Amino acid sequence: MTLNFNHNIFDLNNYLKEKRAVINEKITFYIQKYTSSGRLSDAMRYAVMAGGKRLRPILCIAAGETVLGVSDDHLVAAGCAVEFIHTYSLIHDDLPAMDDDSLRRGNPTCHVAFDEATAILAGDALLTLAFEVLSVEMPRCADTVADCLKIIGMISKAAGARGMVEGQMRDMSSEGRLLSLAALESLHGLKTGALITASDETGALLAGADERQQTHLKEYARLLGTAFQVTDDILNVEGDPVVMGKAVGTDAAKKKNTYPALMGLSASREKARHLIDDALRTLDIFDTKADPLRAIAAYVIERDK
Ligand code: IPE
Ligand code: IPE
Ligand code: MG
Ligand code: MG
């Protein structure tokens, strides 16, 4: 996808390709460095290297670049840590006790390829690996220990009982029970939005963003995260499972609360478009260094996987 912002041509495909290569190389290195070889390590590598979009680490890097103009090692380290948390959440989300899915990132889910106990443990190990990477690798390059602790606190909150895990709890416990739109928005904000926002905020903090820049980048991520989940819900209705690498139609089958279920497909598409228009407006205070974030905003609702 090539986009024209500020009379500047920005090649998003190339940007995503370059960043994914850097992230994948670092993820491989961390798994090698921080795990003992064996079945657990194999299951972790299997899940994390299966080819996700790497949206969260790319957002962390792109938010940092919006402030700094360049990427650096600490943005990549923090981004990889968030990707470990995200991958753990997918492994557990796919388990029989949760969404019971057998396809993820184009491959059999971790519990199908290995077994349920191994998948649970691989998820546990990826979650803890994230915090090891944050506490060992990030201080090598972040300016102060205080910055590192602030980021670790922020990511912990976004991943845990006041963030993603609470969102997953609400998602599971509201199956088959109709939620209001406000309750669905709050659920999605926790389930998906919290970690996406934390990725972007981490990049901003590591890059030394001032308060105004932090506020705008946080609001951008909040809007982007919601648009991302609305699109995920739409793709679960009309996406191609081969392209997406995961099953479709599963939300309706499980009577999940989703945007298409509550407001219909066309209103959902319109909602996603409005959210992205608002997200783009929050970037108006930035120059062309924010073009990657602008392009990512368009990509989030135009993606087919
Ligand atoms: C899927 O996330 C689950 C949601 C939070 C909606 P992604 O769509 O980012 O999944 P990968 O990382 O590309 O596999
Ligand atoms: C995935 O959520 C896990 C988290 C967001 C924590 P979903 O169940 O909505 O996403 P898919 O469709 O399985 O990727
Ligand atoms: Mg789920
Ligand atoms: Mg699921």
Image: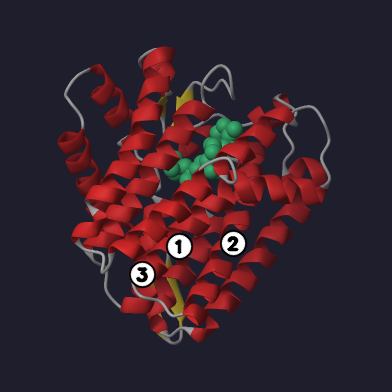
Q: Residue at x 34, y 29 (%)?
A: 125
Q: Is residue 27 above or below residue 69?
A: above
Badge 3 or badge 1: first in the primary sequence: 3
Between the residue at mark 1 and the residue at mark 2, the CA separation in whole angstroms equals 9 Å
Is ligand 1 less than 8 Å from the beta carbon at label 1? no
Residue 63 locus on image (x, y percent): 41, 68
Residue under numbered circle 1: 200
Q: At numbered mark 3, what does the secondary structure look like: helix, strand or loop?
A: helix
Q: Alpha-carbon neighbours of circle 3 within 10 Å: few (<14), some, or many (≥20)?
A: many
Give whichever of discs 2 and 3 has the lower sequence position: 3
Tell me the residue at 56%/42% (across/down). Answer: 164
Q: Where is residue 243 in the image (x, y as percent from the top left)?
A: 47, 39
**Residue assigned mark 2:** 222
Ligand 3: quadrant of the figure: top right
Q: Which residue sits at x=26%, y=61%?
A: 74
Amino acid found under the numbered disc labelled 2: Arg
Label 2 residue SS: helix
Percent x, y for residue 214?
49, 74
Mark 1 closeness class: few <14, some 14–19, many ≥20 residues within 10 Å? many
Question: Quick check: 224 above or below 279?
Answer: above
Whether residue 133 sits left or right of residue 149 in the image: it is left
Q: Say which label, 1 or 2, has the lower sequence index.
A: 1
Q: Quadrant of the N terminus?
A: bottom left
Q: Nearer the viewer, residue 241 or 250?
A: 250
Residue type pointed to by label 1 = Asp
Task: Report which quarter residue 139 is drawn in.
Answer: bottom left
Identity of the amino acid at label 3? Gly
Q: Is residue 254 visible?
A: yes
What residue did someone put label 3 on? Answer: 64
Give the x, y percent position of residue 302: 55, 57
